[in-house]
Amino acid sequence: MHHPRELLATVFGYGAFRPGQEEIVEAVLEGRDTLAIMPTGGGKSLCFQLPALCRDGVTVVISPLIALMRDQVRSLREAGVEAGALTSGNTDEETEAVFQALDEGRLKLLYMAPERLASPGTMGLLRRIGTRLIAVDEAHCVSQWGHDFRPDYLRIGELKQSLGVPLAAFTATADEETRAEIVTRLFGGVEPATFLRGFDRPNIHLAFAVKDNPRRQILDFAGARKGQSGIVYCGTRSKTEVLAQALREAGHAACHYHGGMEAEDRRGVEVRFQQEDGLIVCATIAFGMGIDKPDIRWVAHADLSKSIEAYYQEIGRAGRDGAPAETLTLYGPDDIRLRRSQIDESQAPLDRKQADHARLNALLGLAEATACRRQVLLSYFGEASEPCGNCDLCDRPAQLFDATDAVRKALSAVLRTGESFGAGHLIDILTGAETPKVRERGHDALPTFGVGRDLSKTAWGAVFRQMMGRDLLRPDPDRFGALRMTEGARPILRGEETITLRRDTVQAAQQRTAVKTLVSEEDAPLLSALKAKRRALAEAARVPAYVIFPD
Ligand code: ADP
Ligand code: MG
Ligand code: ZN
């Protein structure tokens, strides 16, 4: 067996591996099923071409486009590698040469289009020639929801089963759904060794802000970038319309986009966005697939995404041209509650829900990061990095404080009140506010009453939000967000661990009226139903509930 590092230099003429390549090559050489997700231009081809040369036998490469296959075969041949393609574009001589090389056992890489798998002789051929590895390029073509779906990719899973050889799949599409579909359809549901690498987009400035007055925050952000193309991602369809309207009133060219619109209208927005300079699209996540505009200068999130993968894909639409691009993500306790309850209320099996909570935790960890955001982000994708100098926390380091004492007081208040209350009431107890609710419940007699007077209510709000963000406290979906302590908080409560939190420099999300402006007609029935339900439950259980939404 040839050593991969040697071949890297002698055959390909490269001095070093790109990030991720070496690990992927190793996994493939170990005969593991492998899924590698790397951005376009990251160097995926090498990850199957190199292993193909290190071993005996043929590597079969499934690729969706004849042009891609031809390019790769040509450059491999120029490097002295025996490679060939069986495509409908071949001349008879080309096909003859491929078969001859196969017969003589010389061919190392055999490229073919997925459609070829449908023809009767193919399976026998691939068995006869001693296929050692199946490499699937552009593996997202197996996803039915993607815009590149190729039905014949569905035959690949069968091919793998029948040949009993490892499979290595490659794509630049990083979202979870596509990944899950690849695992199901190509690997028969057995999780392969997965690599997600080389994802840094250094030109994209990362920033998060606690929701204060979200509409104003978005208007300010867009206002400072007038005339630049941007996207505002919103959590609801109605919000896209409300915000687009507000932006137009502020003198921007803006329109909305969501899945509830006629296909024709959506298409109209896509075309306008592509062609016009400086258009702002306020959109749900329905906007994205197939947008290929290189000069999107900014992406803002009016609501928190559902996972770190989704977030990164959404902001990744900015600055494809490599020029500086900016992002701003707004989030607050309401986002955490919403996302948690969406997971809890979904029909997914328990392990899937746990995985979804973990993915949300990763994003919340990024939102509440205490140092360079890009380091947090890239480490999630398995990349080590230096502080980036291009994120809000590198621009202005967060003020940190040892919050062990505060967190323990908060946890104690949660436990002493039976894990039945939201942050507002708990903060009243901690700061010694003698509200009617505190008196009614006798909470002014608790040992925790008033023990947190050293911090302001706003500061306590930030502590609770960060505790939720770190999954030390979780809103109970069955009790309208009453906070429960998680296992993760136990070591802090017991005094076995300390914790450092950020001191918010902005005011906490106290301005309820501002939030109200973003509650539209579509949300209104839902809100009043929720409030009625909450009141009924409060009456029945005599549990005064914490009001999340504006009254
Ligand atoms: P992808 O398929 O991930 O989009 P490619 O495999 O087409 O990327 O590679 C993109 C470019 O990077 C190619 O020009 C390739 O020659 C180059 N490349 C790949 N690996 C290396 C490396 N280790 N060192 C230098 N250049 C590389
Ligand atoms: Mg490629
Ligand atoms: Zn940074």
Image: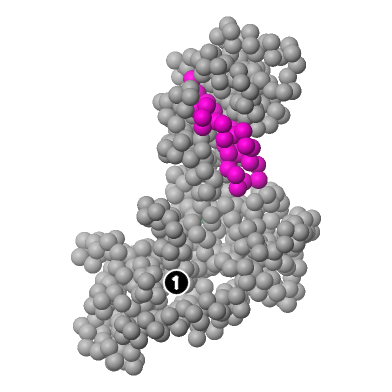
Coloration mode: one colour
Q: What x and y, as percent, mark residue 134?
A: 52, 26
Look at the image and say whether residue 223 sits in the magenta stretch.
no
Look at the image and say whether residue 134 sits in the magenta stretch.
yes
Is residue 408 found left or right of 26 in the rendered image? left
In the picture, residue 95 is in which quadrant?
top right
Reply above or below: 247 against 424.
Answer: above
Q: What x and y, as percent, mark residue 151?
A: 62, 37
Question: Can residue 244 be seen?
Answer: yes
Numbered disc 1: secondary structure: helix
Pick the residue in front: 267 or 503.
267
Magenta stretch bounds: 132-160
Q: Amino acid at mark 1?
A: Pro
Pick the residue in front: 132 or 378.
132
Q: Residue at x 58, y 8 (%)?
A: 103
Reply above or below: 550 against 149.
Answer: below
In the picture, residue 29 is in which quadrant?
top left
Q: Residue at x 44, y 69 (%)?
A: 337
Pick the residue in front: 94 or 500.
94
Is residue 348 found left or right of 417 in the rendered image? right
Q: What x and y, as percent, mark residue 476?
A: 36, 70
Is residue 286 found left or right of 252 in the rendered image? left
Which residue corresponds to mark 1?
Answer: 333
Reply above or below: 259 against 459.
Answer: above
Q: Residue at x 37, y 52 (%)?
A: 351
Reply above or below: 89 against 251.
Answer: above
Q: Residue at x 45, y 60 (%)?
A: 346
* The furthest residue to the top: 104
Q: What x and y, as percent, mark residue 503?
A: 41, 71
Is the distance from the Cβ of mark 1 to the nearest ligand 3 atom less than 8 Å?
no
Is residue 321 found left or right of 311 in the rendered image? right
